[in-house]
C-alpha cells in the first residue's frame, strides 16, 4: 500500500513539474491568433481543443467569435473550421473534412479544415420574431430568444414554457424549406433540472406532416433531430412546434432549428 502511495505521489510530482513546460505562452497565442486572423473569412468557425481552452481563445480572438458562433446549435453550417489546439487535442468540429493548413506556434497548433456545408435557407432563431405563440404569453410565460444553458453548455436558442392541460404551439408561418430541417431541443437551467422532474413531449409539423421529437427530460442534454424535407425542397410552408408537459412547473424548454439545403 505504501508503495502505491509513493508511486502516485511521484507521478503527480512529475506532472506538476512537466505540465508548465508544455503550456502555451502568451507569445504562442499571439502568433497563433495572428495566423487565424490572416486567413479568416466571414462564416468561418473558430474552436479550441481541448474545449477548456476556449476562454483563453476568446481573449485573443473573441472579436471573431460572436454569440451566434459561440452558442451555435451545431457546426454543420460552417464550411471552414479553424482549430487552435494544444497537447495533441482534437475538436469534434475539426474531425471531418480536409486539412488545408497546419502550422505550429510554440505549444499551439493551428489547423484549417474545409468540408462540405449545407446552405441555410431559414434560421429559426434569427427569425424568432416571425413566430406566433398559442396560447399567447401570459403570467410571465413568453417566447424569447436568449442564451440558454443546456447540459452545462451555452446555446443561442428560442425558449418558452409549457402549460398544464393543453399543448403550446410555436408557429413560423412561412419557412422556405430545403432538403433537411434540423432541430435541437433541451431544458434550460441546471438548477431547475435539479428542482423539477416533469418531462416535455414535442411534435414538429412541417405543412401537414407531423414528426414526433424525442421526449425531453432532465438528462436529455442537447438533442438534435433531422427531418428529411427533400419532398418539400423549394416550397415555403408553415412550420409548427407543439410542446406539452403533465408537470410544466420550471420546465424552460429551449430549441434551435435550421432549414438546410
Image (spheres, rainbow, N blue to C red):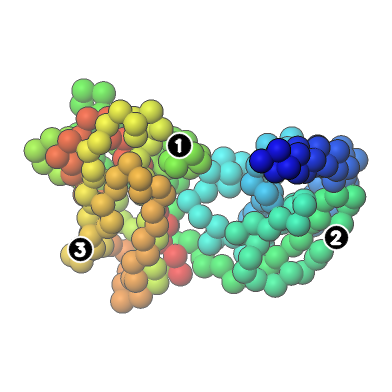
Q: Measuring 63% from the left and 65% from the top, which residue is drawn there?
A: 95
Q: Measuring 58% from the left and 44% from the top, which residue is drawn there?
A: 70
Asked whether the beta carbons under mark 3 and mark 2 sit within 8 Å of each other, the answer is no
Q: Would residue 100 be visible to someone looking at this image?
A: yes
Calculate the distance from the C-alpha at mark 3 to the C-alpha at mark 1. 28 Å
Dot 2 surroundings within 10 Å: few (below 14), some, or many (20 or more)? Answer: few
Asked whether the beta carbons under mark 1 and mark 2 sit within 8 Å of each other, the answer is no
How far across and down, in percent of the image, does residue 16 sit? Answer: 81, 37
Task: Using the rendered view, name the quadrant where residue 233 is placed.
Answer: bottom left
In the rendering, which numbered label is found on residue 103? 2
N-terminal-most mark, 3 or 1: 1
Calculate the distance from the C-alpha at mark 1 to the C-alpha at mark 2. 34 Å
How far across and down, in percent of the image, does residue 45 sit? Answer: 65, 54
Calculate the distance from the C-alpha at mark 3 to the C-alpha at mark 2. 48 Å
Q: Which residue is mark 3?
A: 210
In this rendered view, identify the residue nearer to me: 105 or 261. Answer: 105
* Quarter of the picture holding the N terminus: top right
Labels 3, 1: front one: 1
In this rendered view, identify the residue nearer to me: 13 or 23. Answer: 13
Q: Which residue is mark 1?
A: 149
Q: Is residue 238 above or below residue 171?
A: below
| Horizontal side of residue 60 vs 28, given as left or right | left
Q: Is residue 114 above or below residue 196?
A: below
Q: Is residue 100 above or below residue 48?
A: below
Dot 3 surroundings within 10 Å: few (below 14), some, or many (20 or more)? Answer: few
Q: Measuring 52% from the left and 67% from the top, which residue is drawn there?
A: 118
How far across and down, in percent of the image, does residue 4 sit? Answer: 70, 43
N-terminal-most mark, 3 or 2: 2
In this rendered view, identify the residue nearer to me: 63 or 218. Answer: 218
Dot 1 surroundings within 10 Å: few (below 14), some, or many (20 or more)? Answer: many
Amino acid at each position: 500500500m505504501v508503495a502505491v502511495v509513493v508511486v502516485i505521489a511521484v507521478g503527480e510530482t512529475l506532472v506538476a513539474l512537466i505540465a508548465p513546460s508544455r503550456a502555451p505562452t502568451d507569445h504562442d497565442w499571439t502568433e497563433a491568433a495572428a495566423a487565424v486572423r490572416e486567413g479568416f473569412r466571414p462564416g468561418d468557425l473558430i474552436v479550441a481543443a481541448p474545449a477548456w481552452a476556449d476562454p483563453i481563445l476568446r481573449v485573443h480572438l473573441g472579436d471573431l467569435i460572436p454569440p451566434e458562433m459561440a452558442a451555435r446549435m451545431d457546426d454543420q453550417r460552417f464550411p471552414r473550421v479553424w482549430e487552435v489546439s494544444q497537447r495533441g487535442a482534437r475538436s469534434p468540429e475539426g474531425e471531418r473534412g480536409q486539412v488545408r493548413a497546419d502550422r505550429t506556434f510554440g505549444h499551439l497548433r493551428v489547423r484549417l479544415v474545409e468540408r462540405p456545408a449545407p446552405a441555410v435557407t431559414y434560421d429559426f432563431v434569427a427569425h424568432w420574431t416571425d413566430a406566433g405563440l398559442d396560447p399567447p404569453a401570459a403570467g410571465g410565460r413568453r417566447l424569447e430568444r436568449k442564451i440558454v444553458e443546456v447540459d452545462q453548455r451555452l446555446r443561442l436558442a428560442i425558449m418558452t414554457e409549457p402549460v398544464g392541460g393543453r399543448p403550446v404551439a410555436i408557429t413560423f408561418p412561412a419557412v422556405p424549406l430545403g432538403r433537411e430541417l434540423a432541430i435541437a431541443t433541451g431544458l434550460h437551467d441546471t438548477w431547475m433540472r435539479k428542482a423539477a422532474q416533469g418531462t416535455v413531449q414535442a411534435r414538429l409539423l412541417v405543412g401537414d406532416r407531423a414528426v414526433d421529437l424525442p421526449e425531453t427530460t432532465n438528462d436529455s442534454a442537447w438533442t438534435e433531430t433531422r427531418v428529411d424535407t427533400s419532398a418539400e425542397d423549394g416550397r415555403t410552408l408553415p412550420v409548427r412546434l407543439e410542446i406539452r408537459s403533465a408537470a410544466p412547473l420550471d420546465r424552460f424548454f429551449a430549441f434551435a432549428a435550421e432549414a438546410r439545403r
